[in-house]
């Protein structure tokens, strides 16, 4: 299936599980910890192939994270795989103290992140994780956009020396353009040709990046030039890439599957203001309200995180900039 | 692993050494708290005999082997009693005793809860209900790798109301971690008052046993009893070990014993002088029996 020339890949979660199996072939220290979540984390095959390397902890996320820290302290390479909503809220204090503060390089894999669970509602949504984790020192935060980014991030995660949180969704993702170069955690990817004079810079993260790219394509067709930055890493935050993208554009639109408070948009806005780069800016995300019911994509569409919604947002900003 | 004597056969020489250190550690703790003008006095004094016996008789942890994975491990889940841990670690040579004058001072690594910035400490603790899970992870890793080392943790009795303690307990029994040793500092007091009045958790022995632990009782301020019980580890094959250490908060200083107000009170000059006099008397009594 293709959409605007982009083919549909698989769910990032599937790519995560497959990549981890490949890594575990050669590394007996790789462990997966689950909270009754091996099915939803797509790691059932991992458990079948490496039964000694999967540890079931039951529905006890605090213990999952604490035990992960203890295993990591003993040299294990631990992937704690649990729904992002529970992992980063229920076990937030364990993430803060046992992992980040104690500097244990646990890999926290937040599955079915953002609004992936759709109509299951806010108990199952994680729209706070970027905000909560950005306020905690010593944990890197990554949200891959597509299968390629997921594969590269998980490969890098194995040897990542610091605590790491990776947030993954469960719907098939469009394969975004890439040139097979190495992906570095903390270095954003420019998905469009480098320009010195864009009208619009889309700075997006995770599963909203494809939508930003499609919006950019439709704007280009109308003669509005765009650059699109995939900010897979919220931390380390790629200041150079954001500076480049924003300073060479007239307006900036940030896009994320997160609360508009405390996520990528807030970070970009804060950075640009402090760097003295003043551009009309809009933060597209989930507003501060009870989230509407619907599937992940219906929720995106509802809040304007759609190719048409993002295009309209960009045009409004451009009008304001011109006015 | 250190070679341990048979259960019930703790040498007199060892006991004399441990008793002497218990008095000395109490002096070190009080000086630290007076110098810092802060500290968890009561809890330090209730758990110091346990730490003494662990570090000087039971556990294989030294500055020389600290970087090795096959030594024993210790997690101070009852993190607020950090002064007691600092006293023992300094005595073991992890850092110079003179450093203790910097406890809680501006820019010091010796802050009011344990951190890995301090030599000899392997996990940052202080928020209650965390240490046991981390210890479970360490014990699980040792089992997976076929190592014979053990993992010890001291948990406060007020801490037992944290739900995470029971999550961790379930997993310890599920994974048959008989290399895990959980010692509960059962001093029956927490900052608000009697633990049973704040939140009743008895019967603790039955609760821990039902969760799958092999449970033993011990006088947690008696180094002889502690050494004898801990020499008999593991208590039962395939079960995590739980020691209900019956202690007295503020133990060793008459006016602090079993007094909730000494949870984190700092002695006045007069109180400090009285405490030192009591410790000197205790030391002399030890000398007389030696």
Image (cartoon, coloured by chain):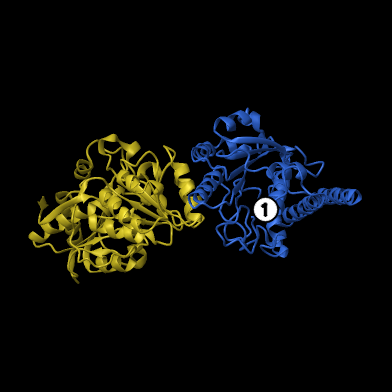
- Residue A92 image offset from top left, x and y in percent: 45, 46
Q: Nearer the viewer, residue A274 or A140?
A: A140
Chain letter for blue, please. B
In this picture, residue A62 sits left or right of residue A214: right
B283 or A254, nearer to the observer: B283
Q: Residue furthest right?
A: B288
Residue B216: % across, % down = 66, 36
Task: Give the percent coordinates (x, y) of residue B25.
Answer: 76, 53
Residue that appears at 30% across and 56% down: A22
Q: Is residue B58 above or below residue B213?
A: below
Q: What is the number of callouts on the image?
A: 1
| Quarter assignment of residue A198 | bottom left
Is residue B119 something that shows in the picture? yes
Q: Residue at x 35, y 47 (%)?
A: A110
Give the quadrant of the C terminus of chain A.
bottom left
Q: In the image, is A243 to the left or to the right of A175?
A: right
Q: Is residue A146 visible?
A: no
Q: Is residue A156 left or right of residue B240?
A: left
Q: Nearer the viewer, residue A278 or B252?
A: B252
The yellow chain is: A
Q: Is residue A15 above or below residue A226?
A: above
Return the x and y of residue B201 as percentages of the image width and height: 61, 30
Q: Residue furthest front?
A: B6
In this image, A202 relative to B4: left or right?
A: left
Which residue is denoted by mark 1 in the rendering?
Answer: B85
Q: Residues within 10 Å of mark 1 (few under 14, many from 20)?
A: many
Q: Observer-nearest residue: A180 or B231?
A: B231
User: What's the chain of the residue with tag 1?
Assistant: B
Identify the secondary structure beneath mark 1: helix
């Amino acid at each position: 299936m293709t959409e605007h020339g982009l083919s549909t890949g698989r769910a990032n979660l599937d790519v995560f599980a497959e990549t981890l199996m490949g890594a575990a072939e050669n590394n007996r220290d790789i462990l997966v910890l689950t909270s009754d979540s091996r099915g939803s984390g797509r790691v059932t095959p991992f458990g079948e192939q490496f039964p000694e390397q999967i540890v079931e902890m039951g529905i006890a996320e605090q213990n999952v994270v604490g035990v992960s820290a203890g295993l990591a302290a003993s040299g294990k390479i631990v992937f704690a795989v649990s729904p992002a909503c529970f992992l980063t809220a229920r076990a937030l204090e364990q993430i803060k103290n046992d992992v980040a503060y104690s500097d244990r390089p646990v890999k926290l894999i937040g599955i079915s992140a953002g609004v992936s669970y759709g109509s299951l509602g806010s108990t199952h949504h994680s729209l706070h994780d970027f905000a909560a984790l950005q306020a905690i020192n010593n944990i890197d935060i990554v949200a891959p956009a597509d299968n390629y980014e997921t594969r590269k991030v998980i490969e890098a995660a194995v040897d990542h020396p610091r605590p790491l949180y990776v947030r993954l969704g469960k719907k098939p993702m469009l394969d975004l353009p890439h040139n097979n170069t190495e992906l570095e955690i903390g270095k954003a990817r420019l998905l469009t040709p480098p320009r010195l004079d864009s009208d619009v810079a889309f700075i997006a993260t995770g599963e909203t990046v494809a939508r930003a790219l499609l919006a950019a394509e439709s704007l280009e067709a109308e003669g509005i030039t765009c650059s699109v930055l995939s900010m897979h890493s919220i931390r380390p935050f790629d200041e150079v890439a954001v500076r480049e993208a924003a300073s060479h554009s007239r307006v900036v639109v940030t896009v994320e599957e997160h609360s508009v408070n405390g996520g990528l948009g807030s970070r970009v806005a804060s950075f640009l203001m402090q760097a003295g780069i003043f551009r009309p800016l809009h933060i597209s995300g989930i507003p501060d309200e009870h989230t509407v019911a619907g599937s992940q994509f219906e929720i995106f569409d509802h809040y304007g995180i759609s190719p048409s919604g993002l295009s309209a947002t960009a045009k409004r900003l451009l009008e304001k900039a011109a006015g | 692993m250190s070679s341990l004597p048979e259960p019930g056969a703790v040498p007199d020489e060892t006991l004399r050494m441990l008793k002497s250190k218990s008095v000395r550690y109490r002096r070190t703790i009080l000086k630290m708290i007076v110098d810092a003008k802060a500290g968890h006095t009561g809890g330090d004094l209730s758990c110091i005999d346990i730490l003494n016996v662990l570090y000087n008789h039971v556990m294989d942890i030294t500055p020389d082997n600290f970087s090795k994975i096959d030594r024993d491990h210790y997690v101070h889940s009852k993190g607020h009693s950090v002064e007691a841990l600092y006293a023992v670690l300094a005595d073991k040579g992890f850092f110079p005793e003179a450093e203790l004058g910097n406890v809680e001072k501006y820019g010091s690594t010796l802050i009011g809860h344990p951190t890995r910035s301090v030599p000899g400490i392997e996990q940052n603790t202080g928020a209650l209900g965390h240490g046991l899970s981390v210890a479970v992870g360490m014990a699980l890793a040792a089992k997976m790798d076929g190592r014979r080392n053990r993992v010890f943790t001291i948990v406060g009795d007020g801490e037992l109301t944290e739900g995470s303690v029971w999550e961790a307990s379930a997993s310890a029994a599920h994974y048959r971690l008989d290399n895990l040793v959980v010692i509960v500092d059962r001093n029956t007091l927490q900052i608000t008052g009697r633990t049973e009045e704040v939140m009743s958790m008895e019967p603790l022995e039955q609760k821990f046993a039902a969760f799958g632990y092999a449970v033993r009782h011990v006088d947690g301020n008696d180094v002889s009893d502690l050494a004898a019980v801990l020499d008999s580890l593991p208590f039962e094959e395939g079960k995590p070990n739980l020691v209900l250490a019956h202690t007295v908060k503020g133990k060793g200083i008459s006016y602090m014993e079993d007094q909730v107000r000494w949870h984190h009170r700092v002695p006045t000059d007069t109180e400090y002088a009285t405490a030192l006099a009591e410790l000197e008397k205790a030391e002399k009594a030890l000398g007389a029996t030696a």
